Image (tube, helix red, strand yellow):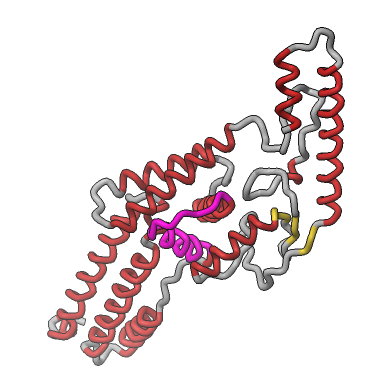
Amino acid sequence: LAEASESPSVLTALKGIAGDLAKAAETVSVYRERSKIYVLVNCRSLCSALQDRTVGIGGWLALLETGLSGHADLRKKVADLSRDMKQAQFKVTENEERVFCTLQREGQGKPATKAVQSAIVMDLARALGIDPSNHTELSKHVKLLKNDLARSNSVSERRILISLERIIDTLSVRSNISALDLGFDVEDDSQILPFKNFLCPLTKEVMKEPVVLESSQTYERTAIEYWFQRCLEDGRDPTCPVTGQILSSLEQKPNIGLAGAIEEWVNRNIEIQINLSVKYLREDPPMMDHVERVMSNVY
């Protein structure tokens, strides 16, 4: 080994390995200090950089092998390690890849519907390992991204940040609205609030045309169609927003049972509203604000 360590090829190989290891460690340390969303935005470039370094080290190991004549066992180990490192593949997960594609699309500055925004948040939260309804935690991650991009000159990264801030703010405001869009005014406690499964996971509104996907999840037809269209435009496989499952079919089966239950619920609330209006109109003397409520419901 003493003789081998003085070989020019061995010295060159060792210097090359040390250099690539230092660069790989530097790359990892930079991303380790960044926010999770920043890593997602740059996941492909990170994987590419690490793979280049790994392949480079594999090449240096191949050079090292040539200088180890007379040391059969060590030479074989170096050769095996060189082969493995040259063949190493650094890949992101399917969900990370989908989120990457979605974020890159956001970087183009194109507007998204409310349904698509909700689906984006579900995908992002799944990649971050947090509950999509936890808007506080999501906001923290977006703020960390903002800190990371404080000195960034990338227009795309800036657009992604602006888009995510807008989406999170919109969803937070929507979640704080206590009155649901029921199609009529809720005047008193006699109104029947909708069951949770009446609400579309994407729009958070009572569904008018509920459909079931192969994932067994139910959505408002127009909402899920917006999401499917976005997936196709992004060049990614269509997924179920709630579960993240890749769908082999875009078939949407009408949820007839749920649609009937929603219709019954709507009719019962309309009946309650009519009875309340009749009660107000029979008041003697009639109260002006009650009359205004009745007229508002009529129109």
- Whether residue 96 is in magenta: the answer is yes
Q: Is residue 102 left or right of residue 26?
A: right
Q: Give the camera-side residue of 53 and 232.
A: 232
Q: From the top left corner, tell me how far across and down residue 240 is, in percent.
A: 64, 60
Q: Main secondary structure of the magenta part?
A: helix
Report the side of 90 relative to 132 (left or right): left
> In front: 282, or 244?
282
Give x and y (percent) for residue 33: 32, 50
- Give the extent of the magenta segment: 95-114
Residue 103 lies, in percent from the top left, at 43, 58
* In this picture, residue 95 sits left or right of residue 273: left
- Residue at 85% from the left image edge and 46% from the top image edge: 261
Q: Position of residue 26 (x, y in %)?
A: 25, 60
Locate residue 67: give its quadrant.
bottom left
* Residue 41 colored in magenta in the image: no
Residue drawn at (85%, 39%), measured in percent from left and top? 267
Task: Determine whether 187 is above or below 46 in the image.
Answer: above
Left of 85 or right of it: where is 298?
right
Give the residue at the far top of this rendering.
285
